[in-house]
């Protein structure tokens, strides 16, 4: 089986009806119980997906910390030309999360999907709060970009076509790297675009959550300076903003705020999608199953950068 054959299963524009019912019952609540429930819903769908067309090489070291690790997911039969490189950074509320929470199914599902579509998928992790505070997560994003510039071509990737894809806390780290110019190398941001899925871009000093305090600190007067939304002049690449229909309201609002701010700055709006019938976890977990709620749009953005 080659990579192009991996996705020859019945595809649905959204979740199966029984999963929709479960997600609707959860509403926009988000806690550990929701995470576990959603993963249990999608693991059977992932197990139905053939992975023989994907070659995975794990735990490359892109820095000195134990969590400076990334996996390379490549088509077993690579295309003849250099592939775009897409890096996925998982979520976890700044204080947790793993690149492989459920074997290679989650969150290896995301780079597997990308590799199955003729791209070089990277699954990366990063240092966690409270030991490592802002902006260390964004510095880890910079470290991954540097590693890919130096090593991506060895695996058939094009170091001039790197895309960053962050979910939740991962999206906050990606946005911080993209928007805060001082965190980028002198040579520039080094990427061609970014997918920001349900991240935090405008910190709320009036209602900080425990994981906000763990990563950004307890001095809320500094939150405005740390917020990516207040550094729009640092962003020089196209972005695709994504959030879920049943995301927590604060995440919805910050995604919309970022969208509106970029519309005003550029007199042109970035790409934006609100994923129907999904919540904060299922929006990432469903990728590479028969549910194609967002995957094709991500591929189209990478190919067109718009």
Image: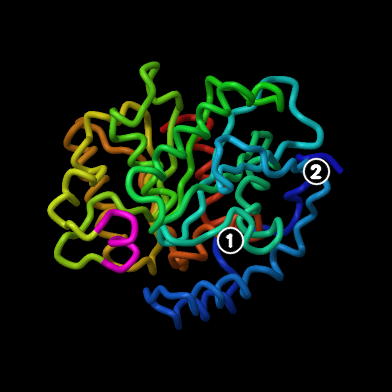
Locate residue 156, reporting x and y percent.
70, 25
Q: Is residue 212 magenta?
A: yes
Residue drawn at x 12%, y 53% is 221
Badge 1 element: loop
3D distance between C-alphas at marks 2 and 1: 19 Å
Instruction: Point out which mark residue 176 bears.
Output: none
Left or right: 263, with 211 as reference point: left
Residue drawn at x 52%, y 80% is 22
Is the image coloured rainbow, by chain, by secondary structure, or in one colour?
Answer: rainbow
Which part of the image, by quadrant, shows the N terminus?
A: top right
Q: Nearer the viewer, residue 235 or 139?
A: 139
Which part of the image, by quadrant, shows the C terminus?
A: top left
Numbered circles on residues, count: 2
Earlier in the chain: of badge 2 and badge 1, it is: 2
Left or right: 9, with 295 as reference point: right
Near mark 2 (Cα within 10 A), the count class, few <14, some 14-19 or many ≥20, is many
Instruction: Point out which mark residue 53 bears.
Output: 2
Residue drawn at x 75%, y 36% is 75
Q: Is residue 130 magenta?
A: no
Q: Nearer the viewer, residue 158 or 19?
A: 158
Which residue is tagged 1? Answer: 286
Badge 2 element: loop
Left or right: 154, with 177 as reference point: right
Q: Which residues are magenta?
A: 209-217
């Amino acid at each position: 089986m080659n990579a192009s054959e991996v996705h020859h299963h019945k595809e649905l524009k959204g979740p199966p009806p029984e999963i929709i019912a479960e997600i609707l019952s959860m509403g926009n609540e988000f806690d550990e119980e929701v995470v576990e429930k959603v993963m249990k819903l999608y693991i059977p769908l992932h197990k139905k997906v053939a992975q023989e067309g994907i070659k995975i090489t794990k735990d490359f070291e892109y820095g000195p910390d134990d969590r400076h690790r990334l996996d390379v997911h490549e088509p077993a039969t690579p295309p003849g030309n250099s592939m775009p490189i897409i890096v996925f950074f998982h979520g976890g509320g700044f204080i947790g999360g793993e690149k492989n929470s459920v074997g290679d199914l989650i969150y290896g599902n995301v780079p597997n999907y990308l590799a199955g579509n003729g791209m070089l998928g990277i699954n990366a992790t990063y240092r966690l709060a409270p030991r490592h505070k802002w902006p260390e997560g964004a510095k880890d994003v910079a470290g991954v970009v540097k590693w890919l510039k130096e090593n991506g071509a060895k695996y058939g990737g094009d170091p001039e076509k790197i895309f960053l894809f962050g979910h939740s806390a991962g999206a906050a780290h990606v946005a911080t790297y993209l928007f805060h110019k001082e965190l980028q190398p002198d040579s520039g941001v080094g990427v061609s675009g970014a997918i920001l899925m349900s991240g935090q871009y405008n910190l709320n000093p009036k209602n900080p959550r425990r994981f906000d305090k763990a990563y950004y600190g307890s001095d809320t007067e500094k939150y405005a300076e740390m917020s990516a939304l207040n550094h729009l002049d640092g962003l020089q690449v196209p972005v695709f903003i994504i959030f879920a229909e049943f995301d927590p309201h604060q995440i919805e609002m910050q995604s919309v705020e970022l969208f509106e701010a970029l519309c005003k700055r550029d007199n042109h709006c970035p790409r934006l999608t609100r994923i129907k019938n999904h919540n904060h976890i299922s929006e990432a977990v469903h990728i590479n199953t028969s549910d194609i709620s967002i995957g094709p749009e991500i591929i189209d953005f990478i190919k067109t950068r718009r």
